[in-house]
Amino acid sequence: MSKNEKRAILYPGSFDPLTLGHLDLIRRAAKMFDKVYVGVLVNPHKKSLFSVEERVIMIRRITEDIPQVEVVDFDGLLIDFCHKTGIHFILRGLRDAGDFEAEIKVAQGLKVLDPEVETVFLGTDTRYSYLSSSMVREVAAGGGDVSAFLPEGEAPLVAAKYKAL
């Protein structure tokens, strides 16, 4: 990245679905970086509720009021995507000590692969410290109301997915 390029960060994940915790991290990162890429991971080995295309569209709609955000999808190694795009910062949210233990190992591995790529850790807002996409899916699968966990207007989309299954 040259001195004239904007500082960009990549927030990678499956975002299946994007929660209020994810959105909080995106908003906070947008205050610190000129560009926030939300990278929706294509993982053919994982069964997702929403397709990659659906997730990208949903996240674009949710973040349309944050001009610094660009939503992209990617597959393969995270470090390869960073090399391809010239991104040197990766955002990871930490809910608890367990997240830190797992994420620090990933960050250290990325450092071995490329010492120029930095992982930026943000502690999750306490309002969302319990929240995960898998918890949302579990509640929704049981017919529960997930509107308190998701950005406005997204809960009906999740409920509709489970009704269609």
Image (tube, rainbow, N blue to C red):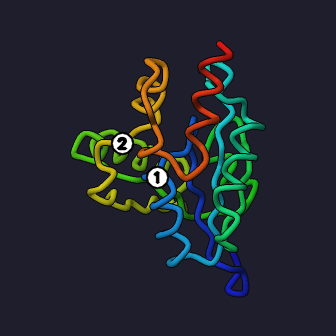
- Horizontal and vertical percent position of residue 141: 48, 19
Task: Residue 35: give x, y in percent of width and height.
Answer: 65, 71
Examine the image and state in which quarter residue 70 appears: bottom right
Identified by mark 1, the residue type is: Leu
Horizontal side of 76 relative to 144 (left or right) equals right
The residue wearing badge 1 is 20
Say which residue appears at 51% left-offset and 78% top-offset: 31
Picture mark count = 2
Quarter of the rendering occupied by the C terminus: top right
Between residue 65 and residue 122, name the one nearer to us: 65
Q: Residue at x 41, y 46 (%)?
A: 148
Residue 6 spot, x, y in % from top left: 68, 80
In the rendered structure, which amino acid carries the disc numbered 2? Leu
Q: Nearer the viewer, residue 91 or 151?
A: 151
The mark nearer the N terminus, 2 or 1, is 1
Residue 9 disc label: none
Do callouts 2 and 1 mark residues in contact (Cβ within 8 Å)?
yes
Does residue 82 lie above or below 120 as drawn?
Answer: above
Q: x, y (%) of residue 157?
A: 64, 35
**In which quadrant will I find the N terminus?**
bottom right
For mark 1, give the secondary structure. helix
Side of 106 relative to 156 (left or right): left
- Residue 100, above or below 91: above
Horizontal side of 142 relative to 83 (left or right) equals left
Crowding at mark 2 (Cα within 10 Å: few <14, some 14-19, many 20+): some
User: Dividing the picture into quarters, in which one does residue 41 lie?
Assistant: top right
Residue marked by disc 2: 131
Residue at 66% x, 54% y: name it: 82
Lateral position of residue 127 relative to residue 33, left or right: left
